[in-house]
Amino acid sequence: MATEGLVPITRAYLARYYDKYPLPRLPDAATALADRLRAISAALALAAAAPITPDEELLEKEANGIPAHKIDENLWKNREQMEEILLLLNKSRRPVALQQRSTAEDTETFIILDDVETKLKDMLKKLEQFQIKNADNVFNTVMTYMPQDFRGTLIRQQRERSERNKQAEVDALVNAGGSIRDRYTLLWKQQMDRRVQLAQLGSATGVYKTLVRYLVGVPQVLLDFIRQINDDNGPMEEQRERYGPALYTLTKLVLAIRLYLHVSLARYGQRKIEKDDIAVLQQAVAIYTEEFEKFTEFIGEVFVNAPFFISAEDAGAESRNSDDYKETIIPAGKTHEVILSVEAVNSYIAWDFSLQQGALNMVLDIGFHVEYISPSGQKTLILPYRRYEADQGNFCTVSAGSYKLVWDNSYSSFFKKGVFGN
């Protein structure tokens, strides 16, 4: 079935949907404990007569600041902070006096930090799994709108290639000695790159839209949706207003936990952690991990059931009989050309066409070839000329520039050809 008649989900439509999913209120203790940990951290720096370092000053500024507005950016920020805390709690990096556990107080503190480490490791793993599952759900849902033929396979291959390249970029940064902060800055940049690419796809015009519709067959309703989904006042803004505040509170709490651990462990040789302070830490971590897990479970359910995730059965994945398959008449003695401007390497160009056979059961064919035109105008043959009754193919670009697809009926003196394709 075609997607004709569908329209992109609007913010008002999502608002009615979100009314069915009220987010349970966070405990007031989440805010109170974050405030308490920031206050303890400031007092520790003064009491130990050790001024805060530039790194601590930056962390303190972030802990006292306003979290990012986007839901997914906050999820990445929480993941980053959990990794930073786990690095602090690594047994080999703990203060020597604490590692030696020469007193009962040291031993008790060590055991509590082990418990904190275990809780955060478990939560970090769950968050990673949540993000992977959510990304796969989004991609697979989008794919239900795509033609279920070689073009869908191409899109999957392109995604896999893109993700391998992104992972290689992260690995190179880590191998070069990049910090956890550096890595998450890159990860968020990659996430934004994905978003920009979607927006560009949705708002593309002219030749690029010809590429999308003519060769890939993406339904227009999907293009319109991905163009507007992350607008400042678009559908996702409703989600941010509804569910963002709770996540922002949890982001501030994990930042306060990290700040406290950073300051207290750095000064452990001068001032050991007091029982009341470690109790505040324990309570903060317990509430943070419990509430963060509840939030991811809740938001995951909202994502999966959201109305912009329309099944192929409901929305209708396009098929070979889709309106996007057009008949192009090529007169006798003429050619038909499609020129595609490609700005980046590793883009897929694909074609799928067949001839409408003539009267009297005559077998008709059409010449077809593909060539590359460099920015300087030099031409390179990509696919050699050959006559076809039908053909289906693709290639991955290795250079930016223009790619020309040519259907040739110049050799025919009498018969026009009807090319049916996408």
Image: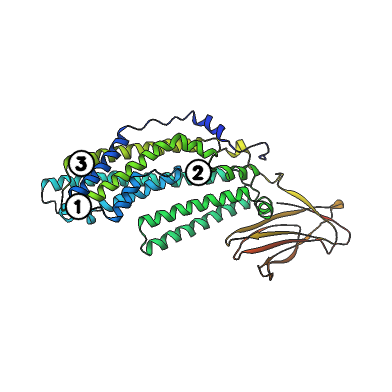
Amino acid type at mark 1: Arg
Check disc 1 and report the residue beneath it.
267
Q: Secondary structure at mark 3?
A: helix
Q: Which mark is residue 417?
A: none
CA gap between label 2 and label 3 equals: 42 Å
- Callout 2: 10 Å neighbours few (<14), some, many (20+)? some
Kindly tell me whether residue 156 is visible in this rendering: yes
Q: Secondary structure at mark 2?
A: helix
The residue shown at (38%, 64%) is 175
- In the figure, 24 relative to 405: above or below? above
- Residue 23 coordinates in the image, percent (x, y): 42, 31
Check disc 2 and report the residue beneath it.
137
- Residue 64 coordinates in the image, percent (x, y): 33, 44
The residue shown at (42%, 35%) is 298
The mark that comes first in sequence, 1 or 3, is 1
Left or right: 121 in relation to 246: left
The mark that comes first in sequence, 2 or 3, is 2
- Callout 3: 10 Å neighbours few (<14), some, many (20+)? some
The residue shown at (37%, 50%) is 80
Name the residue furthest right: 414
CA gap between label 1 and label 3 equals: 14 Å
Amino acid type at mark 3: Asp
C-beta proximity under 8 Å, tags 2 and 3? no
Check disc 3 and report the residue beneath it.
277
